Each structure stands twice: as C-alpha cells, then as structure tokens.
Amino acid sequence: MNKLLYRIIFALIFLGAGIYRLLNPNESFHEMEMLGLPNYPAYLIIGFEILCGIFLLLGKKLNLVYLSLASFLTIALLWGLISNFTMIIDTSTQLFIFNTTATDMMLHLMYLIVIIIILKKQK
C-alpha cells in the first residue's frame, strides 16, 4: 500500500463521517450530549471533517490537515475519556469481543493496515 491509498482511505473516512453527521444531525447532537457539550460543536465538527476529507482527496495542505486531524482526534479521545471514564472502564471488556458492527469492522481494518505497514517496513 502506498501513501496515496492511505490518504484516500482517510479522506473517505472523514468525508463519510462529516456527511453522515450532516444528514443525521440528531445523532450528532446526541453525541455532543453524551460528551456533556452543547449542540453547536456538532456543526463545527461536520464542517471540519468534510473539509479535511476534501483536502485529503485533493492532496492539498496535507501537513496542516494531518496535524489538524491528529489534534482533533487527541482532543476527542481525551474529552471522551474524561467525560465518560466510568462507562469506558465498565465496557472495556468489549475490546476483546469481535462484533460485526461497523465500528468493529473499521477498527479491524485499521489494525490490518497497521500490520501491513509494519510488515512492509521490516523487509
């Protein structure tokens, strides 16, 4: 796999996430509620994900986009951990069970991609 393919995969993930949130705003609002946030950040996240997806597809401003996405994901993970720590600990056993949900499928696809990258670098 090459960088172009990785970039397209990430572009489609973030573009898809933004479009899904745009078409299903109530789910986005629920997500904000679960994080203890008001609704308006949902609109910012939608715009951010769609713009990042477009820039990745076009191959424009890649360093800025990757840095922005890394920052966004770090903040999202930390905020999720802080706001839902007890629930995360209580449900952590789900990490060891493979369910054929979209989340698990995407997670395992990412594992596979990382393993392929590691194997290619070992050659």
Image (spheres, rainbow, N blue to C red):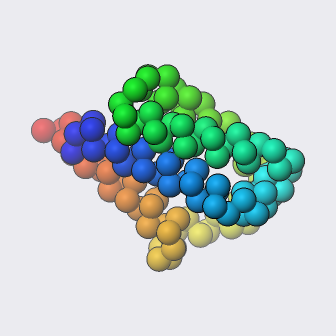
Can you say whether 108 is above or below 117 in the image? below
Q: Nearer the viewer, residue 33 or 55?
A: 55
**Residue at (44, 33) in percent of width and height:** 55
Regarding residue 109, the answer to whether it shows in the image is: yes
**Residue at (73, 48) in percent of width and height:** 42
Q: Nearer the viewer, residue 115 or 63?
A: 63
On-image quarter of the C terminus: top left
How far across and down, in percent of the image, does residue 35 sit?
80, 51
Does 72 sit left or right of 43 as displayed?
left
How far across and down, in percent of the image, does residue 112 sit?
32, 56
In the image as oriented, which residue stretches furthest toward the left?
Answer: 123
How far across and down, in percent of the image, does residue 109 sit?
37, 59
Residue 61, located in which quarter of the rendered image? top left
**Residue at (55, 43) in percent of width and height:** 50
Does 10 sit left or right of 81 as displayed?
left
Regarding residue 78, the answer to whether it shows in the image is: no
Can you say whether 52 is above or below 104 in the image? above
Does 13 sit left or right of 45 as displayed?
left
In the image as oriented, which residue stretches furthest toward the bottom?
Answer: 100
Residue 24, located in which quarter of the rendered image? bottom right
Can you say whether 65 is above or below 37 in the image? above
On-image quarter of the N terminus: top left
Looking at the image, how many numbered discs can be counted on the residues?
Answer: 0
Residue 58, located in which quarter of the rendered image? top left
How far across and down, in percent of the image, does residue 11 sit?
42, 44
Q: Nearer the viewer, residue 111 or 32?
A: 32
**Residue at (50, 48) in percent of width and height:** 15
